[in-house]
Amino acid sequence: MIVRERYISQIRPFYESDLIKVITGIRRCGKSVVLEQIKSELTAQGKDIIYLNFEDRHISSQITNDIELIEYIEKQIVSEKKVYVFLDEVQMVKDWNLACRSLRLRNISLFITGSNSKLLSREFTKELSGRYVSFTIRPFVYKEIVEYAQELGRTVSINDYLIYGGFPKRIEFKGEDEMLRYLNDLDETIVLNDIINRYNIRKKEIFTKLVNYVLISNARIFSSNSVHNYLKSQKTDCSVNTVMKYLDYLEEAYVIRKVEQYSTKAKKQLEFYTKLYDEDVAFNSIRQPNNRFDISHNLENVVYNELIYMGYQLKVYNMNNKEIDFLAVKNGHEYLVQVAYSVVEESTYKREFAPFNELDNSRKKILITNDENDYSTSTVQHIRLKDFLMMKDLSS
């Protein structure tokens, strides 16, 4: 497995800190691999390591609550040297947060992972305010896919990435049928089993309809009312409050990401409308019938994922009801980024450039498409998708 240095380099400065290192992210995005790579790095330095993976039945059956966890770790400590403790999928332990609060008071550097943002729940953050630092791991971006595929002696095309996304394990399957079975099983585990069981959702049919609608409609503007209206049109009885609650569940499990709109007219964030992106475009593609993949919206979703990986803060830029896909901000630099599959057609070219034409040049303007031809103008930089996917930064 490739070394995910982009994430490890962010965590490394905290190796010796008494802050709890919280590593979160969607299931099967590679959290455990990152944890293992950190563990290997510290082991090579001669550090004392304690590692527990609570997805291992042998471990989870013996250690079920905070008291048992603390007692187990204390028995493993045989010297006064600092110990580096790794707790993988720790949320499976009852009152794990109480154990963390206790363990961090010892001569321990504590690393924990979990596949739900409830790791950073109100109760947890209240008890550990200022005593933890969090990192979110995500599925592979294209640069990582290319590197991992080379390690496996294979190649993965951009089109394959636009359809099937970046869950690391799926790259290992040579056959499409096996890969699709893996992605569908993963989807069922994450989206249905985990969330329905975790939140004790009784209206399973309504929740499933909402999930399918949202995930197949990525890179579009949503409101709770619009989702509610869709469900109503499907003869489904569901309140707006329930819709809001279900969307929050999906976000807490890292299945979707919300990007707020920023209106130049109001000069404030529009609170009721957001753009929703899938954590991985595979969630869209496995729901498409007859291989009629939504490449256009997946492309925008992929650009979103790549910009987040590059470290940008993102908003949807709204100017007099003319939308630019992203206002990307990092280190005081701002970029306006428009995304389209192609601008070969004159009508599409005019539509995508129109919002740029009404703005001054105080921010750099970027258009990303899958076209081979260069459509740059004196004020707008056109970046081909294949070039963008290999960039480290918009300024490079």
Image: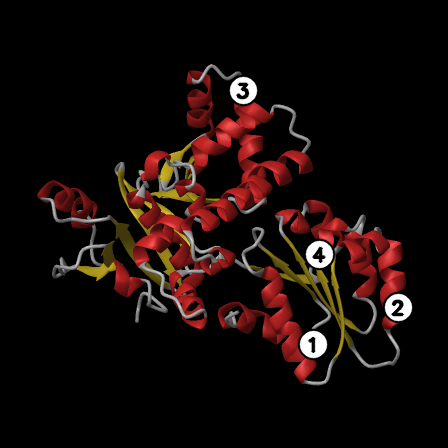
The vertical placement of 373 against 262, above or below, is below
User: Marks 3 and 2: CB-CB under 8 Å?
Assistant: no
Q: Residue at x 33, y 39 (%)?
A: 291
Helix, strand, or loop for circle 2?
helix
CA distance separating discs 1 and 2: 19 Å
The kind of residue tagged 1 is: Glu
Helix, strand, or loop for circle 3?
loop
- Give the image quarter of residue 58: bottom right
The answer to whether residue 122 of the structure is visible from this angle is yes
User: Marks 1 and 2: CB-CB under 8 Å?
Assistant: no
Say which of marks 4 and 3 sits in front.
3
- Give the image quarter of residue 194: top right
CA distance separating discs 4 and 3: 36 Å
Say which of marks 1 and 2 sits in front.
2
x then y, percent, for residue 183: 49, 47
Label disc, if present, on residue 238 of the rendered structure? 3
User: Marks 4 and 2: CB-CB under 8 Å?
Assistant: no
x then y, percent, for residue 170: 48, 55
Label disc, if present, on residue 129 of the rendered structure? 4
Could you classify mark 1 by the number of other residues whose Cα lies within 10 Å: few (under 14), some (14-19), or many (20 or more)?
Answer: few
Tag 2 residue: 74
Label disc, if present, on residue 16 of the rendered structure? 1
CA distance separating discs 1 and 3: 49 Å
Q: Nearer the viewer, residue 345 or 332?
A: 345
x then y, percent, for residue 370: 23, 54
